[in-house]
Image (cartoon, rainbow, N blue to C red):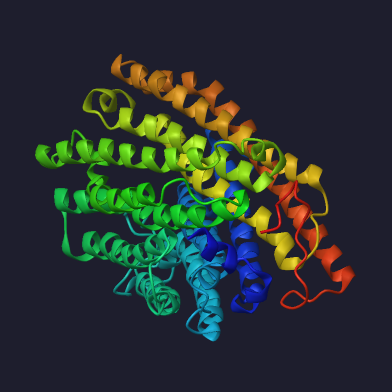
């Protein structure tokens, strides 16, 4: 199967890929990442009373917390995944996407969905409360009361239609492929189906048909399935595609990769209720979520073992090959995340850390420390290939890596350590202000860790801009010409 991957990376097949759309998706994703990080910084400074914009209604932390999470999920991750899919799927199955015009329509339409979401969250409540004509609308212009599903109700049908078009555009070439499919295609097919169903379940059932504990149970499933059935299969599929190419060797065990696929499919949809332990949701469902969560950690362990067995004997690549380092740093964070998750979903430990910043640290470790690092590694590998020139500065690439990974490590460790402190503060029944005062040093450290991560992205943005200028100066068109790979120490010739 590695031969198929190597063939897919052959420059003779570059006409399969619409390279400008890959660039467009990546640049849009990075723009949303910057917006999300600024929103997170706004909230972080609010907690330590350093927010210079305090008191401005439209910049209130309540609104920008929702911007922070929604822009990460649907702005950065979704756009970056779509860009990587437009590169990898045609090369994987040796067929272009179903319709390139549809690809560009989806790109524009998805940005409209995101901008409408931003508008609805920030301006919707104010407009509907102050304009009489808008008060009579049968739906709310503002956010829904669903965690991770705050997209306004009038946007949900548009988002669902967009997800359906994405599935059609990529499933077309995949289903026409003859012979056995590489595991990446398995994950991609699953993600296209699961994401559509997950979004529909989380944004429509609690809003229109369910209430009380039933809505809470479905909301819990949505929270976790958004990660497990949208982000995870796309992330795993892309890693299974890129890592063998970067290491120039087959994945250690194709069979183990399928164990990971079926384990994800069977156990992950049952996990979500572990977000609502000690609630009126029936205990047998809570116990089932705990057991299935621990089972998923074992499944993820098989994936991590598979990738570290693959790099066995090629460890020097972690030093010389920066995209490989991005991928494997994300895998280390993945292992830490799963260990932490197995602990925090037990009833005993959950009683201590529920509602604390332990959970916030966990979320940052998995969303940025794992999947965002993988996507940044993919971008580090692909931008020179898309623009057919070397990176402007290897030093800036190193700054980007170290500021991002160390900044995330400090932030996650800081918040995870804060969690038990907050739990014990509350368990001691001291006044609420005591826990707030005790959290201040940790929250201050989080601000500086976040600034380090933001500085890393600024290094990357500047490096991308200067690399683009170099490519324009060389006069090589983006979508034609001889492919010139960067030097081996950045990304080896595939």
Quarter of the figure with residue 161: bottom left
Q: Residue at x 47, y 71 (%)?
A: 113
Q: For the view shown, which residue lies furthest in the right direction? A: 473
Please state the horizontal and vertical placement of residue 171, each as a whole percent of the image.
40, 75
| Residue 347 visible | yes
Using the image, determine if residue 476 lies above or below residue 302. below
Using the image, determine if residue 34 lies above or below residue 8. above
Please state the horizontal and vertical placement of residue 49, each as a whole percent of the image.
58, 32
* In the displayed structure image, the side of residue 490 where residue 57 appears, left or right: left
* In the displayed structure image, the side of residue 342 where residue 241 appears, left or right: right
Picture quarter with the C terminus: bottom right
| Residue 147 visible | no
Please state the horizontal and vertical placement of residue 251, each as a whole percent of the image.
48, 49
Using the image, determine if residue 129 lies above or below residue 59. below
Using the image, determine if residue 167 lies above or below residue 444. below
* In the displayed structure image, the side of residue 388 where residue 181 appears, left or right: left
Nearer the observer, 278 or 395: 395
Quarter of the figure with residue 455: top right
Please state the horizontal and vertical placement of residue 325, each as a whole percent of the image.
62, 41
Nearer the observer, 60 or 454: 454
How many labels, in total? 0
Q: Residue at x 66, y 43 (%)?
A: 454
Nearer the observer, 199 or 57: 199
Quarter of the figure with residue 25: bottom right
């Amino acid at each position: 199967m590695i031969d198929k991957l190597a063939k897919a990376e052959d420059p003779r097949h570059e006409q399969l890929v619409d390279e400008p759309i890959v660039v467009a998706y990546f640049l849009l994703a990075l723009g949303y990442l910057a917006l999300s990080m600024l929103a997170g910084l706004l909230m972080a400074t609010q907690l330590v009373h350093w927010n210079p914009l305090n008191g401005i209604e439209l910049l209130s932390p309540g609104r920008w917390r929702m911007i922070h999470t929604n822009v990460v999920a649907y702005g950065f991750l979704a756009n970056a995944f779509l860009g990587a899919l437009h590169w990898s799927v045609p090369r994987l199955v040796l067929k272009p996407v179903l319709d390139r015009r549809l690809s560009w329509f989806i790109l524009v339409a998805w940005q409209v969905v995101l901008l409408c979401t931003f508008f609805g969250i920030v301006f919707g409540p104010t407009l509907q409360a102050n304009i009489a004509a808008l008060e009579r609308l049968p739906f709310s212009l503002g956010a829904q009361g669903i965690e991770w599903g705050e997209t306004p109700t009038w946007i949900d049908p548009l988002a669902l239609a967009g997800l359906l078009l994405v599935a059609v555009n990529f499933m077309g070439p995949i289903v026409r492929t003859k012979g056995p499919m590489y595991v990446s295609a398995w994950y991609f097919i699953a993600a296209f189906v699961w994401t559509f169903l997950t979004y529909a379940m989380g944004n429509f059932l609690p809003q229109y048909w369910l209430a009380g504990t039933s809505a809470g149970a479905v909301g819990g499933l949505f929270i976790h399935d958004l990660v497990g059935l949208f982000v995870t299969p796309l992330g795993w599929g892309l890693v299974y595609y890129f890592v063998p190419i970067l290491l120039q060797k087959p994945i250690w065990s194709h069979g183990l990769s399928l164990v990971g696929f079926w384990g994800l499919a069977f156990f992950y949809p049952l996990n979500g209720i572990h977000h609502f332990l000690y609630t009126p949701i029936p205990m047998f469902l809570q116990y089932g979520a705990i057991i299935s969560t621990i089972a998923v950690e074992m499944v993820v362990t098989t994936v991590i073992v598979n990738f570290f067995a693959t790099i066995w004997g090629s460890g020097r690549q972690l030093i010389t090959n920066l995209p490989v380092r991005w991928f494997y740093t994300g895998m280390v964070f993945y292992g830490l995340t799963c260990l932490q998750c197995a602990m925090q979903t037990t009833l005993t430990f959950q009683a201590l850390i529920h509602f604390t910043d332990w959970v916030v640290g966990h979320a940052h470790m998995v969303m940025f420390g794992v999947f965002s690092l993988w996507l940044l590694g993919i971008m580090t590998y692909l931008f020179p290939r898309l623009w057919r020139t070397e990176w402007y500065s290897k030093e800036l690439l190193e700054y980007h890596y170290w500021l991002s990974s160390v900044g995330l490590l400090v932030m996650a460790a800081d918040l995870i350590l804060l969690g038990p402190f907050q739990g014990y503060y509350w368990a001691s029944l001291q006044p609420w202000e005591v826990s707030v005062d005790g959290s201040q040093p940790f929250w201050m450290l989080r601000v500086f860790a976040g600034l380090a991560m933001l500085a890393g992205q600024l290094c990357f943005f500047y490096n991308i801009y200067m690399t683009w200028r170099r490519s324009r100066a060389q006069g090589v068109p983006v979508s034609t010409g001889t492919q010139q790979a960067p030097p081996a120490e950045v990304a080896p010739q595939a």
